[in-house]
Each structure stands twice: as C-alpha cells, then as structure tokens.
C-alpha cells in the first residue's frame, strides 16, 4: 500500500478519535492501528515517517511515534 494511502487512512482514524482528550487520542489511534492494521501497514507508516515523510495529522503523528517506540522496545 502506498505511503500516501496509509497517511490518508491514519488521518481519518485520528479525525475519528479527535473527540477524545488530546492526551488520550494518540494512544487510541495507536491501539486501533495495532488491532486493525496488518503488520506490513504499520511498518510502512513507521518507515515512512522515519524517512522524513510528512502529511500526518498531529494526533496520527503521535500515534505513529508510539508504534515506533513499541517496535523498538519489542
């Protein structure tokens, strides 16, 4: 899947969770990505951001950072 499509999807998910508090929304988005995205999709978005890719909503960007941190820890 293209990075642009992953960014689009992550931003849609972030918009859905925007009603949650600013502190809780990124974790909720990250949890959603963990539960419903295939591992290659998660790796794709993490790699895209690590390579300097842009376009993510701030909440989605924080969620991807959480995924990246979990991947490094695991």
Image: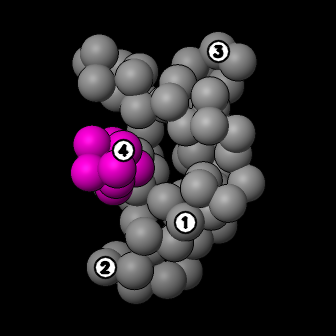
Q: CA distance from mark 2 to mark 3?
A: 29 Å
Q: CA distance from mark 3 to mark 4?
A: 21 Å
Q: Is residue 6 magenta?
A: no
Image-quadrant location for residue 15:
bottom right
Do the residues bearing badges 3 and 4 touch, measured as CB atoms within 8 Å?
no
Q: Which mark is residue 31?
A: 1
Q: Residues within 10 Å of mark 1 (few under 14, many from 20)?
A: some
Relative image position of residue 25 (x, y in whole percent):
45, 73
Magenta segment, prevailing SS (helix, strand or loop):
helix
Q: Is residue 15 visible?
A: no
Which residue position holds label 2? 23
- Where is 18 relative to 55, above or below? below
Q: Is residue 51 visible?
A: yes
- Where is 53 relative to 69, above or below? above
Upstream in the sequence, badge 2 or badge 4?
A: 2
Magenta highlight range: 66-74
Upstream in the sequence, badge 2 or badge 3?
A: 3
Q: Residues within 10 Å of mark 3 (few under 14, many from 20)?
A: few
- Where is 45 relative to 29, above or below? above
Which residue position holds label 3? 2
Name the quarter where the N terminus is drawn.
Answer: top right
Judge left or right: residue 50 versus residue 8: left
Upstream in the sequence, badge 3 or badge 4?
A: 3
Circle nearer the viewer, 2 or 1 = 1
Q: Residues within 10 Å of mark 2 (few under 14, many from 20)?
A: few
* Residue located 28% across and 24% down the image: 50
- Where is 35 relative to 72, above or below? below
Q: CA distance from mark 2 to mark 4?
A: 21 Å
Q: Secondary structure at mark 1?
A: helix
Relative image position of residue 10 (x, y in whole percent):
58, 45
Upstream in the sequence, badge 1 or badge 4?
A: 1
* Residue located 27% across and 42% down the image: 72
């Amino acid at each position: 899947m293209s990075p642009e499509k992953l960014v689009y999807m992550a931003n849609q998910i972030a918009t859905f969770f925007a009603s949650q508090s600013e502190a809780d929304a990124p974790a909720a988005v990250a949890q959603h990505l963990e539960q419903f995205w295939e591992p290659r999709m998660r790796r794709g978005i993490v790699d895209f951001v690590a390579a300097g890719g842009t376009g993510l909503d701030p909440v989605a960007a924080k969620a991807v950072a959480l995924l990246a941190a979990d991947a490094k820890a695991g």
